[in-house]
Image (cartoon, rainbow, N blue to C red):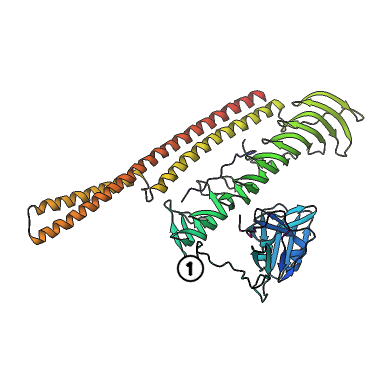
Amino acid sequence: MKQIRRFVMTIWLCGAIFTGLNEAKAEGEAIPVYLDGNHLRFEVPPILENGTTLVQFRPIFERLGLTVGWDEQTREVTGTKRGLVIKLGIDEPDAIVNNQPTMLELAPRLVDGHTFVPLRFVSEASGAEVVWDGENHRIYIRSAGSPTTGTGSGDAEAEEKPQPDKPTKSDKGTYTYPNGDSYTGQLANGKPEGKGKLVDAGGKLLFDGTMADGEPVEGRYKTYYANGRLEIDGRLQEGVLSGAGKQYTDGGKLLFSGMFAAGEWQSGTLYAENGDKYTGEFKNGKPEGKGKLLYKNGDTYEGSFSDGMREGAGIYTTSKGDKLEGTFRLNLKHGVIRHYDKKGNLLSVSEYANDVLVSQVNLGKEAVPVPGTSEPGTSSVVQAEKSRHEKAVQDIKERYQAGKKLLDDQIAQLRKEQPGLYASQAAFEQALNEAALKQTSIQSKLSLLGSDRSQAGEAARAELNKQLEAIKAQMALIQQKGVAQRQIEHLKEQLSLLKSKYDAELKHENTQHAKLIKTLQ
């Protein structure tokens, strides 16, 4: 099995899919939705995004027999009926069904004041069946207890008929990969193809969804740290991490919760080890675009970010209620800054250059100092050093991850080209020695036959020669695998050297940073 590309993301602030409806209709076009043959009417048309349909929550909840609830304070939608309680939070990737968390294809959202939820999830959670009519570009929902199973479009069957190039329900079994991972599900030509589950050698779930040519393509996807803790719990789309998901630290704490796109953070909430929390857009693993940063001391910044720092227009609000509205650059006040008190009164208008006051006009009864926007107790110089350090650490980590991926890919390719490689060099040498001993034993038996030309002797000699040829062929195969094994051992040594270099660079950078901070404070 090809190694699934390990998710690598720069951890900013921390020391520093799909089981959709497979709609073929173009995004942006209205998709008709039918419940038990009746056309559902929505005030705002359904939204199709990344293969998942979102609809207004109230019409679908009510038509499915759910009592609707809305909590303005928590921004939580609730649907209840006998034996069922569904809770969905705005921008939350997990729903709660009867107190059990379930990951969503897409998080609920507000669109022009209307709350949209994933259609398939809500329908199936309430016991209904959802069918996508690809020919007519329609969605049909059959509620529990409905006597019909048709799509409402003539006598077309809702269930997909088996195709010659697709596995049928009878093509089920298990498949074990060379690294010990085990797959259970549909097969085609003996390889994973279709629906199934993939677990590691220890039984931990790696993937649950659709396979193609032996590779995970679309479905739930998990990765783990070397210590066994969960790293990523998300969804694959076309073999890439996409849609709603979560990422954790190697200590088990939630690091990121939100949406992934093309294997990277797209939007959501990032939780820092120091207590800061950022919610907004991302690019290359760092805040980029619009977002809100809540500092551990109660201050907040809401506005534009670039490369993980305050950049552009924004509003900085202190824990006491003072507001600084203006422009920022590299986390520093830069340009015109308006200072308001907690009641909204404009106190002053100032001009800054890299956090240095250039000019100021006081508009209040008396001059009031403009609050700082650096971390409590730090100067702009200290803040600049911290920004430099974060980027240096990021560069070190990116170099290491790039080098590690290159070596990991080479090892995976060798294992693919030479299936059944030995677990270690020692195992290879043991197999070779055993084959050599067997060859010596056969040759000794041939020697003992000597010049025996009896019929029994000739038959025995023929059988021994046959065994000798077989063991020679086996030894040749072992030698061939041995070459690949030695290449893998060499690559593993390079991985070890790369890790040692990474640790040394990181230690040196952290030591230098600590010395500088001590000098500056």
Residue 28 covered by magenta stretch: yes
150, above or below 208, in the image: below
Mark 1 is surrounded, within 10 Å at the Cα level, by few (under 14), some (14 to 19) or many (20 or more) other residues, namely few
Residue drawn at 30 percent across, 47 percent down: 478
> Which of 390/195 is in front?
195
Quadrant housing residue 378: top right
Residue drawn at 72 percent across, 64 percent down: 33
Quadrant housing residue 323: top right
> Which of 242/427 is in front?
242
Residue 158's x, y, as percent? Answer: 62, 69
Q: In the rendered view, does 464 fall on the left or right side of 241?
A: left
70, above or below 372, in the image: below
Q: In the rendered view, does 488 fall on the left or right side of 169?
A: left
Quickly name the residue at label 1: 170
Q: Is residue 405 in sight in this rendering?
A: yes
Residue drawn at 44 percent across, 41 percent down: 410
Residue 156's x, y, as percent? Answer: 63, 70
Type of amino acid under label 1: Ser
Residue 474 covered by magenta stretch: no
Residue drawn at 44 percent across, 45 percent down: 412
Q: Which residues are magenta?
A: 16-31
Quadrant housing residue 521: top right
**Of helix, strand and loop, which one carries label 1?**
loop
